[in-house]
């Protein structure tokens, strides 16, 4: 693999960790370089057909596992944070921007102090924030309706409100479209009528973001599904993909119990190693170290 320019790589050294090992990231203050682009951020990679990131079909993660949670912050999020803290695990929380507002103040944008406190705790506990849109729409529909500005606005509003809630600039480089839907391709308006990347992927490339999907879905939104079945589904997927990204939702009442059960299951299968998303991306793209100056 050819070397990437130092100025475009900005690699932060990731760490793999087993349960009980520490991988804490510092709280980021405005002007700090501690939360710069975590990995590739190279024009060469964004010129390729696929946006850099994690896809449903990805395999071969060397049994590294990353925990991710969607749709928060929520009343159940502190329980998730409480479970993660003793193990010193770094998860990624994909934030829905509107969840940071008071439910009766969508129009005037008043922040909900309790949700803001949860968001700040996520960062202070060493977790990473991702962008899950503002209103959680199905972006495939916006792609079909050819509304690129609305797609961008969904993510830009969440970025703005996260910065406002934290009180400093926290770039959200990791993007997870709601439902994982992004309208992969559409017909370009050029004369040849050829297919081009969908509007969501175009925005991700323009903004040099990372598309983070998943490889093991917990199905925790299926309220009638027993917990043991959710656990089995996750573990079967991890074995099939040799690791990967687990999808859970911190807005679901049974997710804390599911997380606790999964942590116990993973501890009993020592081939799996809980790690952070940065390390998983390094594994996928075979990035080992910074270029020499």
Image (spheres, rainbow, N blue to C red):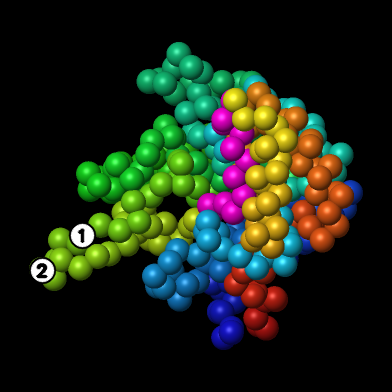
Check residue 94 in the rendering and tell me which mark sits there, or answer none. Answer: none
Vertical relation: 38 (above or below) 92: below
Which of 106 and 260 lies nearest the eye of the viewer?
Answer: 260
SS at circle 2: loop
The quadrant of the image that shows the C terminus is bottom right
Q: Is residue 206 magenta?
A: no
Q: Which residue does the numbered mark 1 point to in the structure image? A: 187
Residue 9 is left or right of residue 34, and the answer is: left
Dot 1 falls on a residue whose secondary structure is strand
Task: Residue 100 in the image: state x and y as whole percent.
Answer: 54, 27
What is the C-alpha distance between the residues marked 1 and 2? 10 Å
Which quadrant: the N terminus? bottom right
Question: Which secondary structure type mostly characterizes the magenta part of the structure?
Answer: loop
Q: Residue at x 34, y 51 (%)?
A: 183
10 Å crowding of disc 2: few (<14), some (14-19), many (20+): few
Is residue 239 toward the left or the right of residue 265 in the image?
left
Residue at point 63%, 41% (across, down): 218
What is the span of residues highlighted in magenta in the rendered image?
212-223
Q: Is residue 94 above or below residue 225?
A: below
x, y percent for residue 259: 74, 37
- Up-down relation of residue 197 to residue 84 (above or below): below
Residue underneath mark 2: 191
- Res 120 quadrant in image: top right
Front residue of 239/285: it is: 239
Q: Judge from the rendering whether residue 181 lies leftward or rightward of residue 197; answer left or right.
A: right
């Amino acid at each position: 693999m050819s070397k990437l320019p130092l100025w475009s790589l900005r690699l932060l050294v990731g760490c793999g960790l087993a349960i009980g090992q520490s991988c804490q990231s510092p709280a980021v203050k405005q002007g700090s370089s501690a939360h710069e682009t975590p990995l590739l951020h190279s024009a060469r990679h964004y010129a390729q057909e696929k946006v850099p990131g994690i896809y449903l079909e990805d395999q071969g993660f060397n049994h590294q596992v990353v925990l991710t949670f969607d749709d928060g912050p929520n009343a159940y999020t502190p329980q998730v944070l409480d479970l993660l803290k003793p193990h010193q695990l770094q998860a990624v929380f994909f934030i829905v921007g509107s969840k940071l507002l008071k439910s009766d103040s969508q129009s005037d944008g008043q922040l909900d102090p309790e949700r803001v406190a949860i968001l700040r705790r996520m960062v202070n506990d060493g977790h990473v924030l991702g962008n899950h849109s503002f209103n959680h729409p199905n972006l495939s529909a916006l792609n079909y309706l050819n509304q690129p500005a609305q797609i961008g606005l969904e993510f830009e509003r969440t970025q703005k409100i996260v910065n406002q809630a934290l009180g400093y600039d926290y770039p959200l480089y990791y993007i997870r479209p709601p439902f994982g839907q992004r309208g992969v391709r559409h017909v370009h308006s050029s004369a040849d009528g050829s297919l081009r990347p969908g509007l969501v992927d175009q925005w991700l490339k323009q903004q040099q973001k990372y598309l983070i999907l998943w490889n093991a879905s917990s199905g925790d939104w299926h309220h009638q599904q027993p917990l043991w079945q959710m656990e089995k589904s996750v573990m079967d997927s991890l074995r099939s993909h040799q690791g990967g990204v687990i999808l859970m939702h911190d807005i679901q009442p049974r997710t804390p119990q599911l997380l606790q059960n999964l942590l116990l299951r993973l501890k009993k299968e020592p081939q799996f190693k809980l790690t952070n998303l940065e390390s998983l991306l390094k594994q996928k793209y075979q990035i080992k170290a910074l270029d020499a100056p």
